[in-house]
Structure formats: structure tokens, C-alpha cells
Image (cartoon, rainbow, N blue to C red):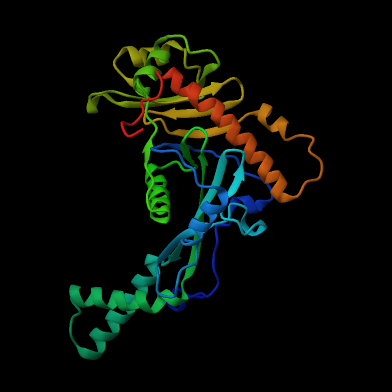
């Protein structure tokens, strides 16, 4: 099929990763403090999410968002509750409109007009022709689906979203806020700057009990001309690393481990990247025998959420404790 005849009626999906046969533990954390106690029951929250359930892209929509079941085809419930943790999942559908296809069709249309009418097609008309081509293609384009998972820790008043970018997390919160009518949520904050604390650790200040340096960091100089350096796969107590810090660079990313249970990269904005649950967590999943999908999902989600509920307060303690929003 050539670009000129490009179309499609099938739907391309980035399949929900939970449908691959096993629970995928969160890899990136954007963490928010809820401004008030979250007291909706799982059933009530499900009913609220139903009002914004994912319906797919209509023929003429470029994109659409809505809530789906965290268990995918294994459940109709839009909330999965485990202890005090409520898992939710937002799906976003986007029409795939390759720029090269649009350009080729536009060039053909312009060439045809110029040849038959013996005149030049200028910018305004080209823009109108391009819009007409996109409108014509929309009903036939493929759709890509991406899913974003999050959970509410109602005991500790936190919202944890599995994404590396704050913009996607904010989109998730905006949809949740629109669904619920209101939701106070602010990025997790600490009394001490993460940058200052991470830099002190690299200078040689002992880390709190349970925490150890990893083998990756990113350092910046306050002067834009002072340079930036990324160090990977190296002992961070080495003189070379300390030399960078002693010459004015400060840490904006730092790899750490916690109690040999978690490894992660702490960012200067308190987001967490490359989170990995070590073997001691996997061992908890070990001899479970034959279980159905929902049971495995429930167990693994509980393990992950309980582990993070233990870890996050200790991380905040290393940063001087949490700086709570005034509203809280």
C-alpha cells in the first residue's frame, strides 16, 4: 500500500501492559499530596469514573481520553481496591496521522490545481487544502492507545502516578478532577532541597540508615557555562566524582538503593525514575501456586503499594521531612 492510498480501519493499540500475563510494577513515580481526606468508597469512585469512561475516538476526533478497568478485560470495575489503595487507569486514544502522508497528498493536490488552472497555489489556500485532507483521512486513520496507571493511598493521603513526566501526571489529575468535580493535589515537597541533600551525600556526608549510593548521578554547575556531567556505572564515592562537586557542581539526579529492596534514581523535583523492586520483593511472589489473573494482580499490587507506603515516608525523612501545603 502506497502512502497515496494510505488508510486503515483497524485499530492499533499499545496494549494495556497488565494484559501481558503479569502485573508490571511501577517504574516511575510522580507523587502528589492530597489536600483533603479521600473518603469515596471503591464503589462510589467506580460510579464517578463511569461518567468519564473511555469511549474511543469518534470518526472525526483526533484524540479522546477516559477511564478503563486497571485489570483490562479481566474486570468491568474501573477501580481495583486493595487495603487502603485504589488503583485506576486512564486510557488515551490518538489518531495516527503521518505527516509524510499528508504532505504527499497535499503536494499532489497542489500540483493538480496548478496544472489544470495555470495558477500558483499560495499559503492560505495550501492551509485550507491541508485541513480538507486531514478531515477526509480522519475516519480512516489508525488509533493508538496508551494507558496510564495511578493509585490513591487513602491511608496516607497520596496520589502516585506511574509516568516519567510531570505533564502527563498533570493531565491525569486534570481528568480525575473533572470526573470528581474537585481534587486538591500538589506535588510532594520536602523541607530540605533534594539537590542540597544529594550534593552533601556526594561530598561524603553519611547517608541515613537503609540508604546507599548507586552508580549513577547527574551534576550541573550553577553557571550555564560551567558545564553538566552525567556519570554512569561508576563508584560515586570516587575522587573524580567528588572533585566535580568540590568545583561547584550540584546533584540533580542520584541513584540510590533502600534496604536492598528498592533501587531508584531520585530527581531534584522529588520524582523517582528507574524504580526497581529487588529480588526480596520478587521472592514474596514466589510459591503462590496456581492463581487466577485477578488474584495475582491483587497480591502484587498490594505488595507494591505497601512497600512504597513504607519507603516514601523514610525518603522524606532523609530530606528533613515533608513540607505540607498550607491547605493541608
Q: How many marks?
A: 0
Looking at the image, can residue 92 be seen? no
Using the image, determine if residue 88 lies above or below residue 208: below
Can residue 296 be seen by looking at this rendering?
yes
The quadrant where residue 85 appears: top right
As drawn, the residue found furthest toward the right would be 289
User: Where, quadrant-wise, is the C terminus in this rendering?
Assistant: top left
Q: Nearer the viewer, residue 160 or 276?
A: 160
User: Which residue extends farthest bottom?
Assistant: 116
Q: Is residue 20 above or below residue 127?
A: above
Say which residue appears at 44% left-offset and 75% top-offset: 59
Q: Quadrant of residue 26?
A: top right
7 versus 202 height, above or below: below
Which one is nearer the viewer's eye here, 135 or 174? 174
318 to the left or right of 119: right
Instruction: Residue at 30% x, 75% y: name it.
Output: 131
Q: Position of residue 254 (x, y in %)?
A: 44, 24
Residue for point 18% across, 81% down? 120
The one nearer the camera, 23 or 217, is 23
- Where residue 98 appears, as percent x and y from the top left, is 41, 66
* Side of 220 relative to 211 (left or right): left
Please determine whether, in this image, residue 61 is positioned above or below residue 305.
below
Q: Position of residue 62 (x, y in %)?
A: 39, 67
Q: Nearer the viewer, residue 54 or 218?
A: 54
Horizontal side of residue 275 vs 174, given as left or right: right
Amino acid at each position: 500500500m502506497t502512502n497515496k492510498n494510505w488508510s486503515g480501519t483497524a485499530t492499533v493499540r499499545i496494549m494495556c501492559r497488565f494484559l501481558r500475563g503479569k502485573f508490571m510494577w511501577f517504574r516511575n513515580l510522580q507523587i502528589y499530596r492530597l489536600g483533603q481526606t479521600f473518603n469515596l468508597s471503591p464503589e462510589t469512585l467506580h460510579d464517578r469514573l463511569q461518567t468519564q469512561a473511555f469511549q474511543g475516538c469518534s470518526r472525526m476526533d483526533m484524540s479522546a481520553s477516559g477511564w478503563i478497568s486497571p485489570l483490562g478485560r479481566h474486570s468491568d470495575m474501573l477501580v481495583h481496591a486493595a487495603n487502603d489503595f485504589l488503583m485506576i487507569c486512564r486510557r488515551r486514544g490518538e489518531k495516527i496521522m503521518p505527516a509524510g502522508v499528508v504532505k504527499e497528498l497535499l503536494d499532489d493536490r497542489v500540483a493538480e490545481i496548478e496544472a489544470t488552472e495555470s495558477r500558483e497555489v499560495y499559503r492560505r489556500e495550501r492551509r485550507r487544502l491541508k485541513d480538507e485532507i486531514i478531515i477526509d483521512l480522519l475516519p480512516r486513520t489508525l488509533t493508538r492507545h496508551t494507558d496510564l496507571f495511578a493509585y490513591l493511598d487513602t491511608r496516607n493521603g497520596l496520589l502516585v502516578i506511574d509516568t516519567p513526566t510531570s505533564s502527563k501526571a498533570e493531565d491525569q489529575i486534570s481528568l480525575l478532577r473533572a470526573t470528581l468535580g474537585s481534587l486538591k493535589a500538589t506535588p510532594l515537597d520536602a523541607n530540605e532541597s533534594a539537590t542540597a541533600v544529594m550534593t552533601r551525600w556526594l561530598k561524603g556526608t553519611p547517608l541515613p540508615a537503609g540508604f546507599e549510593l548507586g552508580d549513577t548521578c547527574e551534576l550541573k554547575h550553577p553557571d550555564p557555562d560551567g558545564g553538566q556531567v552525567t556519570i554512569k556505572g561508576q563508584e560515586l564515592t570516587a575522587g573524580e566524582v567528588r572533585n566535580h562537586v568540590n568545583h561547584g557542581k550540584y546533584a540533580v539526579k542520584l541513584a540510590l538503593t533502600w534496604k536492598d529492596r528498592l533501587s531508584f534514581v531520585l530527581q531534584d523535583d522529588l520524582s523517582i525514575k528507574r524504580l526497581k523492586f529487588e529480588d526480596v520483593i520478587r521472592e514474596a511472589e514466589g510459591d503462590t501456586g496456581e492463581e487466577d489473573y485477578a488474584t495475582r494482580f491483587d497480591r502484587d499490587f498490594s505488595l507494591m503499594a505497601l512497600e512504597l507506603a513504607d519507603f516514601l515516608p523514610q525518603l522524606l525523612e532523609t530530606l528533613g521531612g515533608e513540607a505540607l501545603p498550607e491547605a493541608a
